[in-house]
Image (cartoon, rainbow, N blue to C red):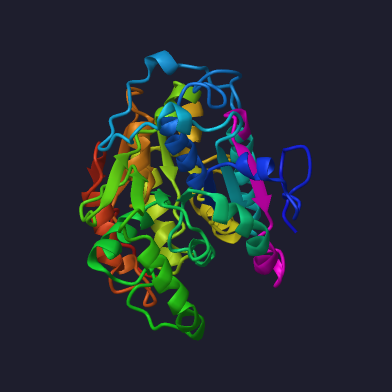
Amino acid sequence: MSLHAGSPGPASTPARATAPAAARAPRTLAFVESPVQLLNVLEWAHAQRRPGQGREPGGGGGGIGGGESRTGLVPAQTRRRVAPQPAPEEAEPPGPWLTLVVLSPTDPMSRGQLRRMAGLAREEGHEVRWEEARDGGTAPFRTIGGLTPALRRADRVVMGDPFSRYVQLLLTITRAADLVVVDDGTATMEFVAQLARGERLVRWHRKGGRRGPRDLLFAPVSAAARRRLTPGGARRVEVFSAMPVDEVPEGVSVTVNRFVWARARFGPPRIIAGADLVGTSLVETGVVDGERYLEAVRALAEAHGVRRYFAHRRESADKLHRLAARTGLEVVRPDLPLELIARRGPIGRTVLSFPSTVVHTLPPALAGTGVRVTVCDIDPSWLTARASPRAAGFLAGVTDSARGVHRLARPARTSGR
């Protein structure tokens, strides 16, 4: 059953909707499965918004964390492509022009952050539709069935994860001519490169492994989604990203995400002495050995005066308990994506991170604050036997392509398990 969070009235449009009601349906649908994806949809929407569409950017209350409105202090966003403006007769009708569809995950940390991000989206004037998309074996059928009418009406679809099987299945239903991919972390770099090379869509940490029965069964849907994400005819594809995008497929437009909305809505933060360390889920995804990771964190904390460890939302509670016991660090479970936590403050004068999305997103989000973002490479000896053959090269590329960060020598090699 579709859940319509935070809006009065029924969760879905009645089966016998009138023609005027259909005409009022939002023309843009965005599908998100993580808090970071939702944040980047808000950044994209901020860049798209025209006067009169929802709450003016930066206006109104402080939202979560009480951030002060600083719209006048934020430089204009530089875009590689200027979207054509519609003629007056094509202007969108009053009311929400963007519906955010949350395909809710099951882990509590992600759900909690998504709830808070959904609240910010509503404050921006957007409609939010919360779908319990993984609540039991029949949930996908209910979710897709409930979304099909809106998908067929939409003329623009925004997605945060083109590798998601859910999103790939939804792409086979929509007739939208405009498709937009916003960042889902470092995976965006791999998505654009695979699209440019005409390869099948596979997450970087799984590439090189053997395809299982489910992969083979889903292969036709994935291939259809890749074709839909390839520009052609009237179909337009945009990538909205803070990540470095080098191999741009022909016909794909790229817009730089400079976190203008986040800087307008939150901060500037209070800077405190010492360093903060950003956690990673590379252990949980099977890329990095758990013991080697804990020892690396301990070495970094001792060498750089780290006080707090900002946990990734997918890090396991058991690992974090062991980390706190071994290092003495204060483990913080953020209630929002780290870019907003850092803007809200307080934040350490130095932020340390292993190769991850934040080495690309924190520098623009914290521009002008004086915070130093430093990245520590992953030693190849930390990788597990299950890690993809491409893991070391991909992680090195994440660091090498980061702008506005400082490089740090790896901690001394650990002695093993």
Give the image quarter of residue 64: top right
Instruction: Please provide percent x and percent y for residue 68.
Output: 52, 17
Q: In the visual, does 227 lie left or right of 322?
A: left
Numbered range of the magenta stretch: 122-142
Instruction: Please provide percent x and percent y for residue 233.
Output: 31, 57
Nearer-the-camera pick, 187 or 79: 79
Question: In the rendered image, is residue 273 in sight?
Answer: no
Q: Is residue 2 above or below residue 408?
A: below
135 in the magenta segment: yes
In this view, the residue farthest toward the right is 9
Instruction: Please provide percent x and percent y for residue 242.
Output: 33, 42
Q: In this figure, what is the number of numbered marks?
A: 0
Nearer-the-camera pick, 66 or 411: 66
In this view, the residue farthest toward the bottom is 213
Q: Is residue 105 above or below residue 155?
A: below
Q: Is residue 193 above or below residue 198?
A: above
Give the residue at x 59% y 28%.
94
- The quadrant of the picture occupied by the C terminus is bottom left
Give the residue at x 72% y 46%.
18
Nearer-the-camera pick, 95 or 65: 95
Q: Is residue 254 above or below residue 273?
A: below
In this view, the residue farthest toward the top is 72
Question: In the rendered image, is residue 228 in sight?
Answer: yes
222 in the magenta segment: no
Instruction: Please provide percent x and percent y for residue 274.
Output: 40, 31
